[in-house]
């Protein structure tokens, strides 16, 4: 006869909260402890998918093809991929010899043997212009020196601009064409012939004067004009072989030949004013002194 043994442990009775008194509820709540939630995050798994590495696992590969590849009958082709790191680098660099490749190399200073990596000081913020720390008591002297340098620089710039200028409104130095003359020559084409004829006469007159001066200087034993160095500060006086000083430019006849009549017109001629005006401007251009003379003739009555 078998006797079954029963579990003598009492079963857990459900808690009747409605039957609790105030003291029992207070005791139960005070015995409860609340702990902060722990970090129950699971292990971190990093997934890396290589874009350029060829997968070595080839399931379902036939032994014949494997043997043929090992023997060197054919090479394995890389799979056609739309995007890969090699393709990105190749597109960024460009082909050899192209402008894209040259720009890429220049941006990275690859062909510059003197290229140096940036130093920590290069990343500091500082002015690019030189900074001069001047004491307070020297500031007035410093400002005066700067103002003087600025004035000299402006005057030198203005002088250089005036020297390189070939057209001016009211020229006072030789070699500058008056602006009014240039405008009139553009409008009146017929006056160019008259201007050329007058200029030829003036140039011939200047050349004759220079040749005569050189010839007289050689005869008297003086140096030719332009051979004396004007950079010396001392004043040098040349005396001829006969002991006579030269006090004027005279020809062999003893008369001064420094005047020439370029243009002659009647007083009633309306175009004579324009011709005289051209002569005066040509004289200013060549550094000559010009003037006009009006000869009044009186005819007595019989």
Image (cartoon, rainbow, N blue to C red):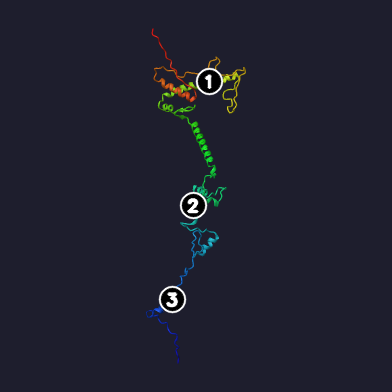
On the rendered image, what quadrant is the C terminus found in? top left
- Residue 292 pos. (x, y %): 45, 19
Q: Badge 3, how many Cα within 10 Å: few under 14, some, many 20+?
A: few
- Residue 96 pos. (x, y %): 52, 49
Q: Which residue is mark 2?
A: 92
Q: Which quarter of the figure has residue 11?
A: bottom left
Q: Which of label 3 and label 2 is nearer to you? A: 3
Q: From the viewer's perspective, is 21 left or right of 217?
A: left
- Estimate the spatial distance between the alpha carbons at disc 3 and disc 2, rounded to whole Å: 69 Å
Q: Which of label 1 and label 2 is nearer to you? A: 1
Q: Which quarter of the figure has residue 271?
A: top left
- Please determine whether, in this image, residue 69 is positioned above or below residue 264: below
Q: Residue at the bottom extreme?
A: 1
Identity of the residue drawn at 48% across and 54% down: 88
Q: Residue at the left extreme?
A: 18
Q: Which residue is mark 3?
A: 30
As helix, strand or loop, the secondary structure at mark 1 comes to helix
As helix, strand or loop, the secondary structure at mark 2 comes to helix
Indicate which disc, 3 or 1, sits on the residue closer to the N terminus: 3
Identity of the residue drawn at 41% across and 77% down: 26
- Estimate the spatial distance between the alpha carbons at disc 3 and disc 1, rounded to whole Å: 132 Å
Q: Which quarter of the figure has residue 240?
A: top right
- Estimate the spatial distance between the alpha carbons at disc 1 and disc 2, rounded to whole Å: 76 Å
Q: Which residue is mark 1?
A: 209
Indicate which disc, 1 or 2, sits on the residue closer to the N terminus: 2
């Amino acid at each position: 006869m078998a006797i079954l043994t029963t579990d003598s442990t009492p079963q857990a009775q459900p808690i009747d909260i409605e039957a609790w008194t105030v003291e029992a509820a207070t005791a139960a709540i005070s015995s409860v402890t609340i702990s902060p939630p722990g970090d129950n995050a699971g292990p971190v798994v990093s997934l890396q998918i290589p874009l350029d590495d060829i997968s070595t696992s080839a399931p379902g590969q036939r032994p014949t093809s494997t043997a043929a590849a090992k023997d060197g009958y054919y090479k394995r082709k890389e799979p056609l991929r739309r995007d890969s790191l090699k393709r990105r680098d190749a597109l960024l660099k460009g082909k050899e010899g192209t402008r894209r490749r040259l720009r890429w190399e220049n941006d990275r200073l690859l062909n510059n043997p003197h290229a140096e990596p940036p130093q920590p000081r290069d990343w500091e913020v500082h002015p690019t212009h030189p900074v001069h720390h001047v004491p307070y008591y020297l500031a007035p002297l410093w400002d005066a020196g700067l103002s003087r340098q600025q004035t000299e620089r402006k005057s030198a710039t203005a002088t250089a601009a005036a020297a390189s200028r070939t057209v001016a409104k009211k020229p006072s130095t030789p070699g500058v064409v008056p602006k009014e003359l240039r405008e009139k020559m553009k409008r009146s084409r017929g006056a160019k012939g008259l201007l050329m004829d007058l200029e030829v006469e003036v140039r011939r007159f200047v050349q004759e004067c220079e040749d005569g001066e050189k010839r007289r200087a050689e005869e008297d034993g003086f140096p030719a004009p332009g051979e004396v160095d004007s950079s010396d500060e001392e004043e040098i006086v040349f005396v001829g072989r006969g002991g006579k000083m030269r006090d004027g430019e005279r020809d062999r006849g003893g008369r001064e030949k420094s005047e020439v009549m370029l243009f002659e017109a009647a007083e009633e001629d309306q175009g004579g004013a324009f011709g005289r005006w051209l002569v005066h401007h040509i004289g200013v251009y060549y550094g000559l002194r010009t003037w006009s003379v009006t000869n009044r003739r009186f005819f007595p009555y019989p």
